[in-house]
Image: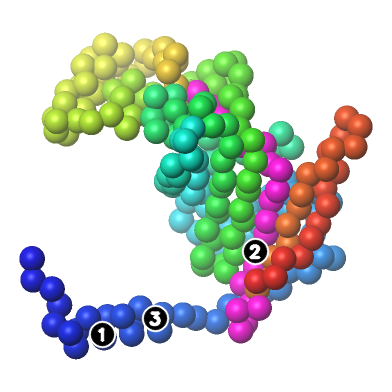
Amino acid sequence: MESDPPDDAARRRAHLAALRRSYVRSVLGEHDLAPDPFAQFQRWFDDAVAGGLTEPNAMVLATASSDGVPSSRTVLLKQVDERGFVLYTNHGSRKGREMLANPRASLTFPWFEIDRQVVVVGAVEQVDRAQTEDYFRSRPHESQLGAWASEQSSVLVGRAVLEQRFAELRDRYPTGAQVPVPDHWGGFRVVPGTVEFWQGRASRLHDRLRYTREVQGDAPRWRVERLAP
């Protein structure tokens, strides 16, 4: 394979290094924060929706294997409440296997268009079966079939294999038929130990405010700290 001429390679490096912009849209002070991270997340999520962001519920999920090998991918947030942040997946997928074997994860919501991101770090627990079934039945019919058709993260010899599986399932469960909830599919909840709210600021002096969970008695308490950018 031919490499770029030295001058072209240098220009590419210089162009990449020069890619930057100033963040001047907003500020985030301690007095701006809600009492807990879930209420603060909802405020910012509403801003992301109102701002017309593409898939504001998209988040980068980072997991690690039992021996510490990391992996990440973009998934969709499907539920959030005071218990945590919920996504759904095939238990046999890489992320599913890793969350079962090493139940810790991180979530990043990269809201570039409004100069914000939210980073969640915490323990992982499985969503109860009743909640999984309720969510599965709320999905479009063909998405339900897709959960059966795809042995997620397994190697395929070609796309035709996947499409054939899907076609067979569509014949078995035509539109209007109830699709059973797969045993190998379900929800995972990231229960946050920390939630960081990052607001881009000028001169790279960003605002970073982090909630940390502290348990006192039966109720969690949240400590807020400012982090250096």
Callout 1 amino acid: Ala
Q: Which residue is mark 2?
A: 198
Residue 1 is left or right of residue 141, and the answer is left
Callout 2 amino acid: Trp
Magenta span: predominant SS is strand
Q: Which residue is mark 1?
A: 10
Other-residue count near label 2 (Cα within 10 Å), few / some / many at <14 / 14–19 / ≥20: many
82 to 55, vertically: above or below: above
Residue 152 is left or right of residue 201, and the answer is left
Magenta stretch in the rendered image: 186-205
Q: Are marks 1 and 3 in contact (CB under 8 Å)?
A: no
Q: Residue at x 21, y 16 (%)?
A: 168
Q: Are marks 2 and 3 in contact (CB under 8 Å)?
A: no
Residue 131 is left or right of residue 145, and the answer is right
Alpha carbon distance from label 2 to label 3:
23 Å
- The location of residue 215, given as percent across then percent down, is 85, 38
Q: Residue at x 61, y 28 (%)?
A: 125
Alpha carbon distance from label 1 to label 3:
11 Å
Disc 1 element: helix
Q: Which residue is mark 3?
A: 17
